[in-house]
Image (cartoon, rainbow, N blue to C red):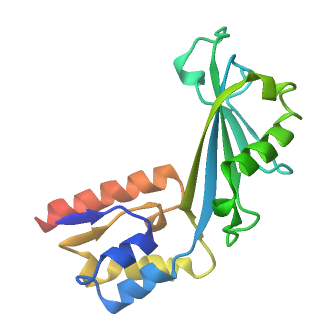
Amino acid sequence: AVILATPAPITASVVTSGFSETVMASLGSIQYAPYVTLNLFLSERVWRDAWSLASLDDSFVTIYDAIRTQVSEDYDEKGILGVYIPGRSARDLSILDQSDDVLVEQTLKDLENYVSGIRKKIVGQDVHRMRYAFPIFRPGYLNVLRKLEEDDSTSGPLFLAGDYMVYPILDGAIESGLRAAEKVEEFL
């Protein structure tokens, strides 16, 4: 038995047999939004009043203190500021092609509104681009889920898991993995 815990388009490109045409078409119909994560390594901790901040009018949607759970509240040494950057729309893939320098510069321009002098505190950066970050749930998606769940070809030996199977968040991915493991146990 195999649990396929990859984004739906990756699963559809890897599996050459074992699923019905209906399942393969359903996997191929699932659209994903891209995302970029940027971690800024800082000479000192700059964010301690909150875990994260959501933003509606900047190039990023969230900034967060990436070390908050590992340090005491009064910690003032090196820090990491995490930044989540979406495309302009779910179909906008242009952020995947932007250079690290362009992404960092736009982010820093916007971050100056929240952390004055942020540029002077940066000692490093780490940028990751994710083509298949979040599945797009749209009207009619329940029919896709039903086809993926109820089709006999998804009852073994191949099983599907991922946030596209439950809800597009980490908890959804975990839940779908648990469901897939239960199905494998039943299958075996």
- Quadrant of residue 116 within the rendered picture: top right
Give the residue at x 72% y 46%.
Answer: 101
Give the residue at x 63% y 79%.
Answer: 139
> Vertically, is 55 above or below 186?
above
Count of marks placed on residues: 0
- Measured as percent of width and height from the top left, residue 168 is found at 54, 60
- Measured as percent of width and height from the top left, residue 45 is found at 69, 18
Give the residue at x 34% y 91%.
Answer: 21
Return the residue nearer the eye: 146 or 160. Answer: 160
> Vertically, is 1 above or below 49?
below
Q: Tell me the quadrant of the picture where the N terminus can be found.
A: bottom left
- Quadrant of residue 32 within the rendered picture: bottom right
> Vertically, is 61 above or below 81?
below
Return the residue nearer the eye: 172 or 29. Answer: 29
- Measured as percent of width and height from the top left, residue 85 is found at 69, 51
- Measured as percent of width and height from the top left, residue 76 is found at 68, 10
Q: Tell me the quadrant of the picture where the C terminus can be found.
A: bottom left
> Vertically, is 128 above or below 17?
above
Return the residue nearer the eye: 29 or 121. Answer: 121
Q: Residue furthest bottom?
A: 21
- Quadrant of residue 44 within the rendered picture: top right
Q: Is residue 64 left or right of residue 56?
A: left
Q: Is residue 74 left or right of residue 150?
A: right
Q: Residue furthest left?
A: 188
Q: Is residue 185 left or right of residue 152?
A: left
